[in-house]
Image (cartoon, grey):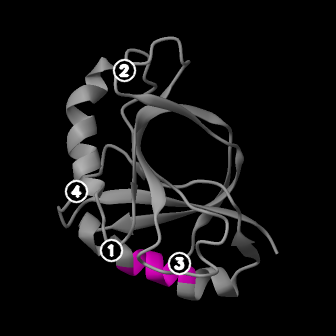
């Protein structure tokens, strides 16, 4: 598994967020709430969706699947001039990312993450950076379809 390394410029996002853990995963609830309302976002850039996680700086050092983090369902926007009710804004900060392609059902993504964090990252010239992690759900994303594709963006910095 070899990622492409990309410098992401800062992005403005509008969406909804929830606090959850891997054990008490509410991702489905978050997306079921967000998807019907995303059409209310008038200034979206493109059709890509961001499934974004914000972890405490020590989250991976002391990994515990019960530990909570913030999860977002969001889209990129041109500005924050019109924020629909029940939505919030966030700025995704610029920085270096290792971008991995995940192919297959979304439910098999955990295997890709395991490979990234147990094999690729420890053997790479990078370490995790304390910025949001996200999955970019583009035109080829089809949830549980075996032909589905999504990108896993992992924030990194040189060791």
How far apart, in angstroms, are the residues tagged by discs 3 and 2?
33 Å
110 left or right of 153 in image: left
Q: Which residue is identified by label 1? A: 23
Residue range in magenta is: 111-117
Residue 130 percent across, percent down from the top left: 69, 60
Closer to viewer: mark 1 or mark 3: 1
Task: Quadrant for residue 42, please give it.
Answer: top left
Q: Which residue is identified by label 4? A: 143
Quarter holding the C terminus?
bottom right
Q: Categorize mark 2 by other alpha carbons within 10 Å: few (<14), some (14-19), many (20+).
A: some
Q: Which mark is residue 41?
A: 2
Q: Looking at the image, which residue is at 46% across and 82% down? A: 114
Please report contact status of discs 4 and 2: CB closer than 8 Å, yes or no: no
Q: For numbered disc 2, what is the local secondary structure?
A: loop
Residue 50 percent across, percent down from the top left: 43, 45
Image vertical order of residue 147 relative to residue 111, above or below: above
Residue 58 percent across, percent down from the top left: 65, 72
Closer to viewer: mark 3 or mark 2: 2
Q: Looking at the image, which residue is at 39% across and 67% down? A: 21
Residue 114 sits inside the magenta stretch: yes
Please report contact status of discs 3 and 2: CB closer than 8 Å, yes or no: no
């Amino acid at each position: 598994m070899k990622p492409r390394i990309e410098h992401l410029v800062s992005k403005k996002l509008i969406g909804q967020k929830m606090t959850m853990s891997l054990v008490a995963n509410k991702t489905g609830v978050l997306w079921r709430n967000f998807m019907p309302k995303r059409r209310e976002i008038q200034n979206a850039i493109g059709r890509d969706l961001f499934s974004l996680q914000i972890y405490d700086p020590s989250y991976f050092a002391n990994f515990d699947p019960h530990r909570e983090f913030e999860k977002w369902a969001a889209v990129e926007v041109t500005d924050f001039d019109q924020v629909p009710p029940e939505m919030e804004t966030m700025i995704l900060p610029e920085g270096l990312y290792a971008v991995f392609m995940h192919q297959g059902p979304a439910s098999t993504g955990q295997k890709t993450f395991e490979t990234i964090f147990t094999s690729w990252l420890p053997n790479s010239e990078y370490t995790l950076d304390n910025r949001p992690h996200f999955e970019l759900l583009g035109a080829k994303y089809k949830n549980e379809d075996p032909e589905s594709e999504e990108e896993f963006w992992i924030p990194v910095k040189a060791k």
